[in-house]
Amino acid sequence: MLTLNAITRGILDGRHQHYPTPHIDPRPVDAETADETAVRMLRAYHSISYLRLVDESGAEVREYHRHEFAFSNSPLWDVHCRVVDADIAERMRVRSA
């Protein structure tokens, strides 16, 4: 099982640091859904600077930065579009019900 940890960059204790984003607990994810979960978390929480994906032993597998989902030539662009399209379809379904 993998875990997504929300990380924030900013001034803490008088120094610029990277630290766990307050009030956002780590999220367990499957390898297949890590990309989609990362997109959803970055869209929902603007205080997150980036997400760190770690395995069971705590070793870093990957980092997700916001800009990776924002450019059409990025491999994660398709993931972003798929998640946004699914969210829009869900809102339309709820609105028409």
Image (tube, helix red, strand yellow):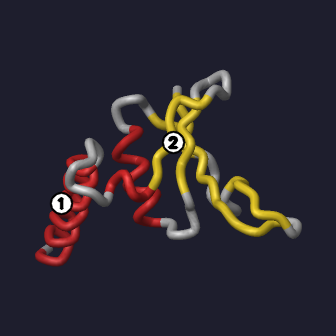
C-alpha gap between disc 2 and disc 1: 24 Å
Residue 3 versus residue 15 in the image, above or below: above
Q: Residues within 10 Å of mark 2 (few under 14, many from 20)?
A: some
Mark 1 neighbour class, 10 Å CA radius: few under 14, some 14 to 19, many 20 or more = few
52 left or right, relative to 64: right
In the picture, the disc for residue 63 is 2
91 relative position to 48: left or right: left
The one of 96 and 12 positioned closer to us in this rendering: 12
Along the polypeptide, which appears first: circle 2 or circle 1?
2
Which residue is drawn at the image coordinates 76% and 63% (left, top)? Answer: 16
Q: Is residue 76 above or below residue 93?
A: above
Q: Position of residue 21 (x, y in %)?
A: 66, 59
Which quarter shows the C terminus?
bottom left
Q: How many marks?
A: 2
Identity of the residue furthest to the top in this view:
57
Residue at numbered disc 1: 85
Specify the amino acid type for callout 1.
Answer: Asp
Above-or-below relation of 79 to 71: above
The residue shown at (60%, 46%) is 5
* Residue at point 15%, 64% (across, down): 89
Q: In the displayed image of the protein, which residue is found farthest to the left?
A: 96
- The amino acid at mark 2 is Glu
* Residue 86 in the image, given as x and y percentages of width and height: 20, 57
Q: Quadrant of residue 80?
A: bottom left
Q: Quadrant of residue 94?
A: bottom left
Please report the residue visible at 25 percent of the width from the left and 63 percent of the height from the top.
87
**Dot 1: element:** helix
Q: Is residue 87 above or below residue 82?
A: below
- Badge nearest the viewer, 2 or 1: 2
Element type where label 2 sits in the image: strand
* Front-lying residue, 76 or 15: 15
